[in-house]
């Protein structure tokens, strides 16, 4: 596969078939995608359109059934489980709709866990991470557990945890889905700011067209394919 | 970091943690109590044997260290033995089991006093009538007896004539002739204790006696005490092994169930860890470390509970069930509990490792 210069994600003919009992569900039916480094892409589409599946494959949570996808220099189609685990620990990070913080741990320990897993020093936050925590407005909330924080705060901790390992790609799955409009706007602005200031590559799934407008371009998915791209 | 994760996990569900620890503690306590009772019983026997003050014990053929074949020695043998070179005193006793771990011992008060230096009475005096018994302080505490109390032994009532300091031969003493008649062993003895002019002559005297009394069980008191061990009590070592096996099984079952439930409850958290790039080894490490923490907690709790059982035994049956503290068995009991716990964590750990991260993240 010829890789365009500085393309951090490149997919060709990506297919994914799930076997649910005796029924085969074709979630992706040949997706081609190029994402240059530093781009902020929004992915929209109805339920079952394949956007989450694309997200999971790019994030190394599952391999494709067919086709090829190269993420941050790794061919996710061929690297196997160990390679996908390495991809998750070193190159991609997730932000989920339900925040997915470890409930037993404080915000600080959630971030430390991500650092530890990625092989970085977990006990001392470097200046960049400290300034990120300031930017996110959670520097004073690090010793609280998720149950002691608002949804907006939890999502900002999730963003901090995701970016603490300096991933090449941030995958955000409906990051504002569980937030009120004020917190949604705050999180979207943070993502846009991170993209503009740090050049962070971001893929964001959303149902919200206003949220999608924060990206450089929007991929419209339908029936397992990218049906349209808008800028 | 794993320590933080494990610590927060065990803290997060305190009731589950506490129950698991207590259940793992059960076999640890069981093992330590059994070992403590065995050791305590044997130490008590050894101490009481040494308290006789003899140098040699003479028993009938076919008797083992911890069992007696009733009263099988002819009483007149005492006189014969007294005439052996270097033997200065000989006194015979009769042992009669009275149920459980207890037995009553018939002694000749004059001979026994000469050999042992005599009892130290805390209450009352030596028996003088056929229905009188002397008991030691342990037995008196166990049965709430005082001088003048009546206690039932061998299906008849006895008056406690005195209470003595423990540590000499037995817990209950009656007149040897009286006991011989009661158990139908008139003129017979269970064993004869010999005192020598000089303890250094013991090997020489034993050799001479063995030459003269072929097949008889003749031990120096030092040898007898050294032979009072778990391995010389029929079936005890096997029983201990069975309890150890039960300990491993309980530890395995408790931790397996507990960690299985924990893995189910934490399906989403395992998905989160995997989404962060946690390796299978990391996930397995958390489960195994948590099991080890439960095993360690169970060991500590089990050791503490063994002191509770000891305290209980000391207050309920200090004579029949003396429980020793055996620190050398703490690490062994701990290893047994940890072994069971670690074995029990393998399946839940594998279950966690095999979880699909996407399904785990979608788990409600």
Image (spheres, coloured by chain):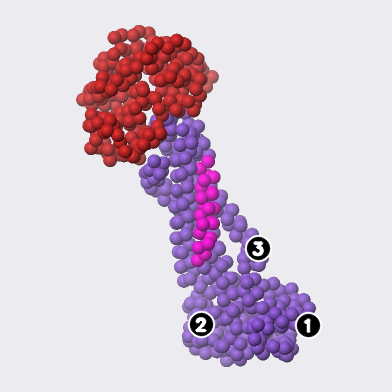
Chain colours: A red, B purple
Let me know if residue B233 is in the magenta part: no
Q: Residue at x 37, y 8 (%)?
A: A227
- The crowding category of the residue bearing disc 1, from other C-alpha atoms within 10 Å (few below 14, some 14 to 19, many at least 20), is few
Kindly identify which residue carries mark 3: B235
The residue identified by callout 2 is: B165
Q: Are marks 3 and 2 on the same chain?
A: yes
**The N terminus of chain B lies in quadrant:** top left
Tell me whether circle 3 and circle 2 mark residues in contact (CB < 8 Å): no
The segment highlighted magenta reads: B325-346
Residue B237 appears in which quarter of the rendering?
Answer: bottom right
| Position of residue A151 measured from the top left corner of the image (x, y, whole percent) | 27, 31
Above or below residue A113? Residue A28 is above
The residue pinned by badge 1 equals B212
* Residue drawn at (25%, 37%) of the image: A141
* Label 2: how many Cα within 10 Å (few below 14, some 14–19, many 20+): some
Which callout, 3 or 1, points to the residue nearer the camera? 1
**SS class of the residue under badge 1?**
helix
> How far is the residue under mark 3 from the one under mark 2?
32 Å
Q: Which residue is drawn at the image coordinates 47% and 15% (left, top)?
A: A68
Res. A230 visible in picture = yes
Frontmost residue, B324 versus B94: B324
- Residue A168, percent across and down? 36, 23
Q: Position of residue B87 (x, y in %)?
A: 69, 88
Specify the quadrant of the image occupied by residue A48: top left
């Amino acid at each position: 596969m010829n890789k365009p210069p500085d393309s951090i994600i490149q997919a060709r003919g990506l297919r994914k078939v799930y076997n649910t009992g005796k029924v085969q569900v074709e979630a992706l039916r040949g997706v081609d995608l190029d994402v240059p480094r530093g781009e902020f892409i929004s992915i929209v589409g109805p339920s079952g359109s394949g956007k989450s599946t694309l997200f999971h494959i790019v994030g190394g949570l599952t391999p494709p059934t067919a086709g090829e996808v190269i993420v941050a220099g790794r061919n996710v189609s061929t690297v196997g489980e160990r390679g996908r685990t390495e991809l998750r620990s070193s190159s991609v990070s997730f932000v989920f709709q339900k925040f997915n913080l470890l409930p037993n741990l404080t915000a600080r320990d959630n971030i430390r866990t991500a650092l530890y897993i990625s092989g970085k020093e977990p006990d001392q936050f470097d200046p960049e991470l400290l300034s990120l925590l300031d930017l996110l407005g959670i520097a004073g909330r690090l010793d609280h557990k998720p149950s002691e924080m608002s949804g907006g705060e939890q999502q900002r901790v999730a963003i901090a945890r995701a970016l603490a390992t300096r991933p090449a790609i941030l995958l955000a799955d409906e990051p504002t889905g569980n937030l009120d409009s004020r917190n949604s706007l705050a999180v979207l602005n943070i993502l846009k700011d991170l993209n503009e200031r740090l050049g962070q590559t971001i893929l964001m799934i959303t149902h919200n067209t206003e949220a999608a407008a924060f990206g450089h371009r929007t991929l419209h998915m339908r029936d397992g394919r990218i049906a349209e791209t808008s800028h | 970091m794993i320590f933080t994760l494990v610590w927060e996990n065990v803290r997060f569900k305190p009731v589950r943690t506490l129950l698991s620890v207590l259940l793992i503690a059960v076999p640890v306590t069981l093992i330590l109590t059994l070992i403590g009772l065995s050791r305590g019983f044997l130490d008590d026997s050894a101490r009481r044997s040494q308290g006789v003050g003899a140098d040699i014990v003479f028993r009938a053929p076919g008797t083992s260290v911890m069992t007696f074949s009733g009263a099988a020695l002819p009483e007149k043998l005492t006189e014969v033995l007294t005439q052996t070179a270097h033997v200065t005193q000989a006194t015979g006793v009769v042992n009669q089991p009275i149920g459980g771990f207890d037995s009553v011992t018939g002694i000749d008060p004059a001979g026994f006093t000469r050999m042992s230096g005599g009892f130290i009475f805390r209450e009352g005096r030596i028996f003088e009538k056929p229905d009188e018994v002397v008991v030691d302080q342990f037995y008196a505490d166990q049965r709430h007896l005082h001088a003048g109390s009546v206690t039932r032994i061998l299906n008849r009532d006895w008056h406690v004539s005195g209470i003595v300091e423990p540590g000499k031969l037995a817990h209950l003493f009656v007149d040897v002739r009286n006991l011989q008649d009661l158990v139908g062993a008139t003129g017979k003895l269970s064993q004869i204790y010999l005192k020598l002019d000089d303890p250094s002559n013991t090997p020489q005297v034993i050799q001479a006696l063995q030459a003269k009394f072929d097949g008889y069980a003749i031990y120096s008191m030092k040898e007898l005490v050294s032979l009072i061990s778990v391995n010389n009590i029929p079936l005890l070592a096997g029983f201990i092994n069975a309890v150890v096996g039960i300990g491993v099984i309980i530890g395995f079952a408790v931790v397996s169930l507990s960690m299985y439930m924990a893995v189910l409850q934490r399906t989403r958290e395992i998905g989160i860890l995997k989404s962060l790039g946690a390796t299978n080894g990391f996930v397995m490490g958390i489960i195994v470390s948590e099991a080890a923490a439960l095993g360690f907690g169970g060991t500590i709790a089990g050791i503490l509970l063994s002191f509770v059982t000891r305290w209980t035994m000391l207050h309920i049956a200090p004579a029949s069930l003396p429980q020793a503290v055996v620190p050398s068995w703490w690490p062994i009991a701990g290893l047994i509990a940890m072994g069971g716990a670690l074995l029990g964590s393998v399946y839940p750990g594998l279950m966690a490792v095999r979880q699909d991260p996407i399904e785990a993240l979608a788990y409600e």
